[in-house]
Image (spheres, rainbow, N blue to C red):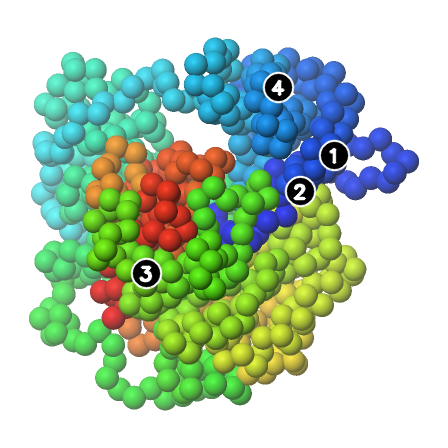
Amino acid sequence: MLKPKIKRLQLAVLFLFLSFAAIGLRAVTAEEIPTSGDLVVKAWQAKGAKDFDATIKYTQQCIDLYTAEAEKQQASLKTLPKKRAEIESVQILNDVGTAYFIQAEAYRDIKKDPAQALKLFKIVLQKFCFAQAWDPRGWFWSVSKASRESIVKINPKEELPTPCPGTEEQGSTPSCKVSQLPTKIVLYDAGKEDFVDYAKYGELQNVGTKDYKYVLKDQEGLAQAVGEGVYPNTTSVRWDPEFKKAQKEKRLECPHWDFVHSPDLEAAFLKWALAPEPQGVKLFYTGLILEKSGLIKQAIKCYYAIVVHFPGSYGWTYWHTPWSVGQAAIAKINYLLRNNPKLGFKLSDAQIRIINGFDNDVSNDVVITNPGKFEKIGLFEKLKPKTSLEKPVLKRALGTGKVRLAQYETGDWQLLVNDAPYIIKGITYAPTKVGQSPDEGTMGNWMEEDFNNNGKADGPYDAFVDRNKNNLQDNDEPDVGDFLLMREMGVNTIRLYHHPLKIKKEILRDLYENYGIMTVMGDFLGKYAIGSGAPWNPGTDYNNEEHKKKMVESVTNMVMEFKDEPYILFWLLGNENVYGYACNADKDPEAFFKFANEVAQTIKALDPEHPVAICSGDILFMDKFGKFAPDIDIFGTNAYRGDYGFGSLWQQVKEYIGRPAMITEFGCPAYAEGKIADEAEALQASYHRGSWEDIENNMAFAGGAGNALGGFVFEWLDEWWKGYEPGRHDTKGLWVGPFPDGYMHEEWLGVSGQGDGKLSPFLRQLRKAYFEYKRMWK
């Protein structure tokens, strides 16, 4: 992802109703003709304010001025544009289609005129079906698809035109149906060795340098050792009787990417073992399929073949950031060996370092490889305590208050609160009532909402657990409140931003005093144009002195208001600003990190008693953070990498930054296509277990990088608005990622759910992940 996390936004982020702003358009003066993008931004704002007349004014102006050009752009297309540059090249089409959509929603939601809304939604389908709009969470969405859904909602029997080629809506009826026959893989050729000694079949040259390579001398011997599906064994699969059988049954007809999450694991394995992909990518996905079938040793052989033969392999994430296949392969091996101790092996010294690997340009990457080796784990090592029993020797302490950072002579880091080690067992808490949406201007403030009029905030104090999941509050299901449930889960920290919603200090004091939960308080630092005074387009400019002045004022106000509150753990700057979206940190990361460092200096002058952290996006531009932000104490980042945890991230932070780290956001949906609820919950819990174990293994004195301070689970409660219709628990996959069915289902990220939504905001259905954390965080 890979985050990169959407990742993930605090719900308050989208409160300004700028969700679908056009990209890269300038502000205008009164004397100029407004651009289509400016008019769409104003239209969204007017609709969010429920100003019908203004909404119609701006949308109609966009339609009148730009329809002719939009029609030309529509006619120039044969299929839906996929790449961002292609999408933005028809921006007028996107804006006019969006203007019709906004106008239709205004008639439906404000004017209560569904007949006129239907006419306008149909215009999108008939004339502007290739229009797409931008969601600031990180993706474009099909305006025609959303229009089609809206039409069906108004009148399920309404006759609809045929979808345009390539649009998302056409994806529901794929031209090729992948086999859904549940199978397990039975290997025809499992290979002669479980843990292959590559030195027997070739020479590992220049280990630990950029000139590393494996010179294969006995290809036949290695092919026999590794078995089918593992490079260089490219022939055994074709001799596998199951291959011929699957061909005869036409179970291999579809493209190989369609097989990644097919329950027909046998067909998926055969298809991927012969896929026309770069060897590193092919081996990784073959390994994933073998892993699903329980063939752990063969999966490890696939992953290790990447490390030995193709360490520099890379792929691209949904966000078009590079993905190091080799580094992910090492992380997968360590994860599988950790979770299968009966295998009795460990991978020692394996490391792939990528010089210049923190940007999106792979052409300048320099790959330094040490493939390491598999070693048997002896009895003494098995009995050895996980953490060192020796008393650590303090090297230095950062901070003067009750919250400090300590680095020891070993290089390891700890966060200390009142001189005691503090592991961040955090969660994002932003309970949202079903039916509310920032996109529609209906989002409430959980600190103030009191729908049962008892004088208390609903979520924190009146939530109840629907134990039997009957979507009712039975007599034996009393009100307990989220704060108590989180305390019982083991949560000790929440992550919160001081804007744009009002913070009620008395609630956070109660959270701390009666439930023992502290708060990390953040400022968006211009992300989504919050705090900078900049318009959404083009957003915050970190070279603009006026923007910088306003952001410093925002941060100063935050620190002065909260610095003496006992619940403050530390300060947090930004929310994955490096990905852009209404700010230019993605285009000028040096300017962003230099400014963030200036802000950190300002904070420390005002409050020397609390550390300062950044909230970045995975490892993008991490080298620039290390160079230009030396006064920020903690590297925090949103990361969604998979069930194995965070891989090489910890070691990279240690080598390039030399400061402690935390994961500011990680999580997994509790929904997976083709899985029943119980199975999907189990997969979510497994993902969280792998993530937290990786964090634990990299804490001080645990044998890993020694710099992990903890992390924040995303999130406490499902939010139903993220897939567009806030009254429906949408199961659509919003983007491709390393999740159980290959998609991020953003409305299902909670460790607790809201049932059928009818008793929102009070009902809680606790998921398996909740109880997994209750076990791990005890």
Between 601 and 306, the one lying in front of the other is: 601
Secondary structure found at label 1: helix
Nearer the N terminus, badge 4 or badge 2? 2
Element type where label 4 sits in the image = helix
The residue singled out by tag 1 in the image is: 54
Give the class, few, some or many, for how many residues have Cα within 10 Å of label 1's Cα (few <14, many ≥20): some
- Which residue is at 62% across, 74% downward? 561
Residue under numbered circle 2:
49
Looking at the picture, which amino acid does disc 1 mark? Ala
Q: Nearer the viewer, residue 709 or 731?
A: 731
Q: Say what amino acid the circle numbered 4 marks.
A: Gln
**Between discs 1 and 2, the one toward the N terminus:** 2
Describe residue 743's horizontal placement relative to residue 144 as left or right. left
Task: Tell me, yes or no, whether the two marked residues, 1 and 2, touch with CB atoms within 8 Å.
Answer: yes
Q: Which residue is mark 4?
A: 116
The residues tagged by marks 1 and 2 sit, at their Cα atoms, a distance apart of 10 Å
Q: CA distance from mark 4 to mark 2?
A: 21 Å
Q: Quadrant of the C terminus?
A: bottom left
Res. 292 in view: yes
Rendered view: 521 above or below 741: below
Mark earlier in primary sequence (4, 3)? 4
Residue assigned mark 3: 479
Q: Amino acid at mark 2?
A: Ala
Give residue 79's mark. none
The mark that comes first in sequence, 4 or 1, is 1
In front: 471, or 197?
A: 471
Picture coordinates of residue 335, whole percent (x, y): 25, 55
Query: Residue at image x 58%, y 13%?
Result: 126
